[in-house]
Amino acid sequence: MPEGDTVFLTAARLRAALVGKTLTGSDFRVPRYATVDLRDQVVESVGSYGKHLFIRTPTVSIHTHLKMEGTWRIFHCGQRWTKPRVTARLVLRTDEVEAVGFSLGKVEVLRLADEHTVIDHLGPDLLGPEWDVAEAVRRLERYPEQPIGMALLDQRNLAGIGNIYRSEVCFLRRVHPATPVAEVPDLFALVNEAQRILTESVRKPPRRELIYGRTRRPCQRCGTPIASQLLGDPAPASDRIAYRERGIYFCPRCQPLPA
């Protein structure tokens, strides 16, 4: 699943391609918005909050969420698309480019005044200008018995972490992802680590994972084979998406569970 850094960088690419440009056409391939026509509207801004992306004109905010497989790509007008046309859910055109959202998990058109309703319930944005580590920690501490690996995925606590970075953050802090929040030795340090590595990933992409997806390969600290397991409700072995969403990766030696 794309995480906060991917959405942040996607917003930056869309911003460079669209902001200040007049739309010559829009194609919402979502039944509810099929009749929406944004021709002649100027794109005023593009922004992100956690895993949510917003493209704004003077009258509306186009809200999209990538979910598991979504992606935005930008093509010169007339250029052949590099993904199947049937997977396109939204197309925004200018005189020069086509911005195409493929396999988007959510597409909706909001009044500008209603944009806040999408993010009001979310915790602080790890990549946002108003990042607040104290508020993120306060939210995490509301459920002291919850495993930290699950708490980090809850966007109501802090916005932008997905399955990759929860494993990476816990590894860097030597914390087993199944450790209850109340037993994490230094929650502030762990949350600051999360903000650090996401910020680093948008400044120097791509980031090479230290532990995620490295099952049975040697730990880069101690050489112990990396382990993986499901965290939370069990998922059918055949459900690869559920496994990727719930699977945690850890070093049994560097990240022991508290006694």
Image (cartoon, rainbow, N blue to C red):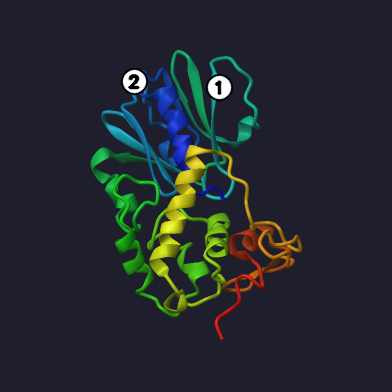
Rendered image: mark on residue 97: none
The spot of residue 17 in percent (x, y) is 44, 23
Using the rendered view, name the quadrant where residue 247 is placed.
Answer: bottom right
Q: Residue at x 41, y 17 (%)?
A: 24
The spot of residue 137 in percent (x, y) is 35, 66
Q: Amino acid at mark 1?
A: Phe
Q: 160 or 57, which is in the foreground?
A: 160
158 sits left or right of 251 in the view:
left
Q: CA distance from mark 1 to mark 2?
A: 17 Å
Q: Amino acid at mark 2?
A: Gly
The quarter of the picture where the C terminus appears is: bottom right
Q: Which residue is mark 2?
A: 20
Q: As displayed, is residue 144 above or below residue 3?
A: below
> Dot 1, how many residues are within 10 Å of its Cα: few (below 14), some (14-19), or many (20+)?
some
Using the rendered view, name the quadrant where residue 250 is placed.
Answer: bottom right
Secondary structure beneath dot 1 equals strand
